[in-house]
Image (cartoon, helix red, strand yellow):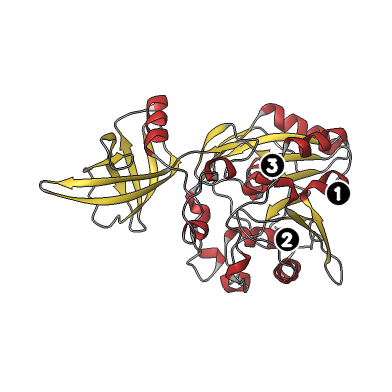
Amino acid sequence: MRVDAFDFELPAEAIALHPVNPRDEARLLVVRPGSDSVLLADEQVRALPDLLATGDVLVVNDTRVIPARLLGERRRETTSARIEATLHKREGDSRWRAFVRPAKKLVVGEVVHFHADGVATVLEAEVLDKSESGEVLFGFRRSGAELDAAIATVGTMPLPPYIAARRSRSATDDADYQTMFARDPGAVAAPTAGLHFTPDLTASLERRGIAVCRVTLHVGAGTFLPVKAEDTADHVMHAEWGEVGIEAAAVLNAARAAGGRIVAVGTTSLRILESSAAIDGTIAPFSGDTSIFITPGYRFRAVDLLMTNFHLPRSTLFMLVAAFSGLSTMQDAYRHAVRAGYRFYSYGDASLLFPAAIESGAA
């Protein structure tokens, strides 16, 4: 499909620069595709227990955002130049792939010196490889837990570019940009649908007989990259590491067998579930990389409902929700959201999406 089919008008004032407090007071647009027209309902996230049914299972992503934005310099004889690196995928105990600005003048084999607040160097990395797109493979001179600790000292949590470009960091961002489920460090962007949950909300879900199940997908910085291709068939997704544990797979298969629905909290949870699912929808334990790219025509196997935030025009995430509920349905839903004053993107409001009817010939 042409990428411009997924474009839409969005006023700048619709982009949320701060989250609501408490988190579960965010608005929730319920989207039910119909045979003739889409059915929309304006709710709040805290109404979620009443919108679901006993036996349903919410699947959340328990990845934890790391301080992946690093500032440093390359040094050559008497000259030096500042660089900014955003780590996006770990490749081993001492290796990370990163997007670097400026990357053009970096040379394979040279060493970059990262520091905190312009003081002494605490972390060094060799440029092992680089691509024309600005992606660099760094080999750090520390590894494992020692490297993690150094990154925590040197780095800062990267805010999405559409927030960072419009305001400076606030004292609350480190907490605001982390879900209550965050446990497994490795993401460089938050699984933002999970930001809406609070202990009170999860307790209400539990009383209703709705379980919460954890999976992991370490969200990479590639989630913010624009789709530069003109056709979706020519776009290549960056790989991200994820895991569906043995216990999680068993819980989800049992819930499905008992008539419950699997509700993915966020596109990241959906992508790792679909990566682990067989053709018949059975979910198997999974651990490894996934670069699954979901566009209209995809036959969903593992997920029955999707809770997700409002996404960028022409983004892979808007393509995914269009695949789930239908492109015309989501165009109608987003037009309504703009008119009704919903807040967009990472710190914005959420939607609860029901699937479009399965069409013959879908793959």
Q: Residue visible at 69% across and 63% down? A: 322
Query: Is the residue 54 above or below the residue 361 in the image?
Result: above
Cα–Cα span, label 1 and label 2: 28 Å
Helix, strand or loop at label 3? It is: loop
Q: Amino acid at mark 3?
A: Ala
Disc 2 designates what residue? 362
Q: Residue visible at 61% across and 53% down? A: 347
Say left or right for 167 vs 111: right
> Residue 150 in the image: x percent, y percent?
37, 31
Disc 1 designates what residue? 51
Of pointers 2 and 3, the one earlier in the residue sequence: 3
Residue 277: which numbered mark, if any? 3
Callouts 1 and 2 close, C-beta under 8 Å? no
Query: Is the residue 191 above or below the residue 11 in the image?
Result: above
Of pointers 1 and 3, the one earlier in the residue sequence: 1
Callouts 1 and 3 close, C-beta under 8 Å? no
Callouts 2 and 3 close, C-beta under 8 Å? no
Quarter-wise, where is residue 261 in the image? top right
Q: Residue visible at 79% across and 53% down? A: 44
Q: Is residue 164 visible?
A: yes
> Residue 184 in the image: x percent, y percent?
56, 32
Q: Nearer the viewer, residue 354 or 289?
A: 354
Image depth: mark 1 or mark 2 in front: 1
Q: Amino acid at mark 1?
A: Leu
Residue 92: which numbered mark, if any? none
> Residue 331 in the image: x percent, y percent?
71, 70
For label 2, the crowd category at 10 Å Cα-Cα, with few meaning under 14, some 14 to 19 and many 20 or more, is: few
For label 1, the crowd category at 10 Å Cα-Cα, with few meaning under 14, some 14 to 19 and many 20 or more, is: few
Helix, strand or loop at label 1? It is: helix
Q: Residue visible at 75% across and 50% down? A: 25
Say left or right for 181 vs 307: left
